[in-house]
Amino acid sequence: MPTYIKLTQDGLTTTEDPFTFVADDDQYIPPGDVILSLARFQADGERLLSEGRAVGVRVTADETVESLAYDLPRLSVVALEFPKFRDGRQYSNARLLRERYGYEGEVRAVGDVLREQAQFMLRCGIDAFEPADGSTPEAWAHAAGRFRHVYQRAADERVPAFVLRAERQ
Amino acid sequence: MYRYDTIDKEFVADRANEFREQVGRRLAGEITEEQFKPIRLMNGLYLQLHAYMLRISIPYGTLNAAKLRKLAWIAKTYDRGYGHFTTRTNLQLHWIKLRDAPDILEHLAEVEMHAMQTSGNCIRNITADPYAGATSDELDDPRVWSEAIRQWATLHPEFSFLPRKFKIAVSASAKDRTATRIYDIGLAMRRGRNGELGFEVMVGGGLGRTPYLSHTIREFLPTRHLLSYLEAILRVYNRHGRRDNPWKARIKILVNQLGAEEFARQVEEEWAKSDHELVDLPDVELARIRGHFAKSFETLPARSEAFEAAKAADPEFARWTRHNLHPHKAPGYAIVDVSLKTPGLTPGDASSEQMELVADLAERYSLDEARVNYQQNLILPHVKLEDVPTVWRELKAAGLATPNIDLVTDIIACPGLDYCTLANARAIPIAQQIAERFADDEKAEEIGELKIKISGCINACGHHHVGHIGILGVDKKGEEFYQVTLGGSGAEDAALGAILGPALPYEKVAEAVEQLVEVYLRERKDGERFLDTFRRTGVAPFKEAVYADVH
Amino acid sequence: MKGLTANRLIDGEVVFWNAGEWIERFADIEMFDDAAAAEAAEAHAKAQPTVVVDPYLMDLVEIDGVWIPVAYRDRLRALGPTNHLQHGKQAEGGKVVETLQHAHTAARSTGRINLIKRK
């Protein structure tokens, strides 16, 4: 079974991936958990969910998570696709999933996903990663842990500097 | 000025460590140049024509003696003993080695400095009025807000991979000394109906291939909501800004494509959905930041006999005071402009020795403060009038007292093809040639206010679109040619320049500027500046003079 | 005629290809009149990502018996900035440096490089 990196109670770990990505033109859907494109989910999502599978949606960079708002409680994973690591649109999608819609399932970064962006991704609420550069969970943990402080709130639990400062007074 | 606490110090130390590791990985071949490039850009490191260039951040242009001395030392130790102050109030070093960059970042961290986000598709250095805290015509010290924005924008996880670079300017007086109208976001402080302070929020200004002046999307935003509102603007931009074409990726394109009204509506809609409390700074933090900018001045008489006597005795000093001195809000004080525009030298450059001198003067005579402005000059903001003659003499000895602020020889020029891989033509020699023709102080004074701005390419780092005379380097069949524009302005009367005529070859540009000045001197009425005469006569008489032999 | 150039990764220095080595003086550059040989060298350079950045082939032209780059940008890379003649490779002087400098300052507006005359 293929693996990916997931943030668990034990930190970033290599995890087996039970999901299969089903392309829009795949006639055959294998048994088990599946990830679909937004369009395919809108067509076949209900049916697949009713079969008792875990279902996820893969969102491209020019799609917005607003269109998933009502379905989020039933989705196990939202995969955010980074076409190029420099394309930062999914950081907004990730934050909205967590902070505006309260999504508690897995938010997974797929596509051109590199360890040097680990901190940005985790802070935006992404908790799972399919790295494109062969990097290990240890490398991701290292990259994500480089800064002792943050200046602003985001989707994670880190306390921003201005709150720490107020607490000191 | 803002002083780092432990959190800020640890932040820049962590950043220097991170970059050291990343450079190591690049040298070992563990990351590609394509993956490394945004990383090094977000630490201010460009690969230029002759070497790497490091752009050091000078937040809202404010420095103290310790910082200036460190910059001088870094320039001497790792570069060629000089630095270039830019139109974004940063410092560039043009001869840097990649292997030294991590050490340099560590040295900068020692004096609470860094090179974070001075390049890359992220939020860049936040600028402010260079006379902040010293001028009487401000509603508040804009640097309080620039510092608040700076921290919020630093390593912002959502906004570090924008479609393109993002620049914010803050102004708090009626006179616009930060060119807010040509910024991605310009914030102009206003007083609301109930006397509270707020910002007029302007979005979508920018120069480059498609220049635009910004549009006001919100007439009055209470100051306490600044950060949450900025977040809404940045989010709309991050999600909807174009990513298919780098020439069409700035927010100005989005604002003009949607129209200001629709853009504003989208921002307001996004802002309405967000929980402002989570983003906006609490009063206690704003007060903490504000406390760093408070300055107390001695009670002095408004008039200094020593100063007046020095003016009467020395016409050269008197001339310098006419152009390089600005009134201070505290009686008995003055704001001193330090010109980095000696005719014949490179505009905006300062040697390490000169930086050290300005550091000394700042420490002894300016309450340990110096500034950089977007005209690539320095400022000593808090000098007692009685000390001004001494300061002038020391500046003069160091070649820093050319009496030319806002005059014809106070030219803005980007580094151009002499240094920059993006350039089409050289800008520095053009500036030198023009300045040499007007080097006579009396002549320059007679001409009066004339802002010449030169860019070596369409990226417009020299702000040519908003020059009274703008000069743009273009490549015509492999040769250096220059497009001249007239009538631009980056002040509160902002305007984009109009093209004069066909591009001129390198050897004709300085002569053309002389011809333009002659037309102005001939046509001007009633104390008009060059810009005023142009606005009255239009381009015709100027075009005729420059292209006369073409007919 | 072509020559291969790049920037050295570790320090950004402009370098030129000569028989498999990267050298700093333009005067020592290897010149290719055969396109295949030029492209082979470029391919070698592109396979050295921890040594050089952005290798590319320059067009060269002969001026008074000296071969120099056609493009201004490439000439400046071989010389240094024109506002500080003591900075960069030009400080060394010599016939090739002089040719580069004179060719640059004596450019004509016809755009045809081989009409450049010395003063």
Image (spheres, coloured by chain):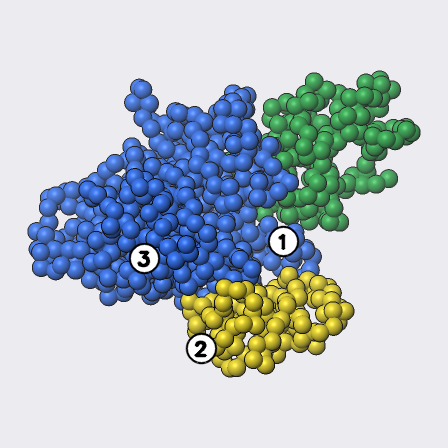
Chain colours: A green, B blue, C yellow
Residue A87 x %, y %: 64, 40
In the rendered structure, which amino acid carries the disc numbered 2? Lys
From the image, tell me which residue sits under label 1.
Answer: B36
Query: Badge 2 local density, few (<14 within 10 Å), some, or many (20+)?
Result: few
Q: Chain of mark 3?
A: B
Asked where in the image residue B430 lies, by quadrant, the reply is: bottom left
Please give the count of numbered marks on the rendered protein.
Answer: 3
- Whether residue B318 can be seen here: yes
Residue at (57, 44) in percent of width and height: B247
Check contact, mark 1 vs mark 2: CB within 8 A.
Answer: no
B127 with respect to A116 (left or right): left
Query: What is the distance, in whole Å, between disc 2 and disc 3 at their CAs?
Result: 26 Å
Label 1 residue SS: helix
Quick check: do tags 2 and 3 share a chain? no
Residue B514: assigned label: 3
Query: What is the distance, in whole Å, between disc 3 and disc 1 at their CAs?
Result: 47 Å
In the rendered structure, which amino acid carries the disc numbered 1? Phe
In the rendered structure, which amino acid carries the disc numbered 3? Glu
Vertical relation: A112 (above or below) B254: below
Residue B404 x %, y %: 26, 55
Q: Which quadrant of the rendered structure holds the N terminus of chain C? A: bottom right
Check contact, mark 3 vs mark 1: CB within 8 A.
Answer: no
From the image, tell me which residue sits under label 2.
Answer: C119
Q: Nearer the viewer, residue A139 or B129?
A: B129
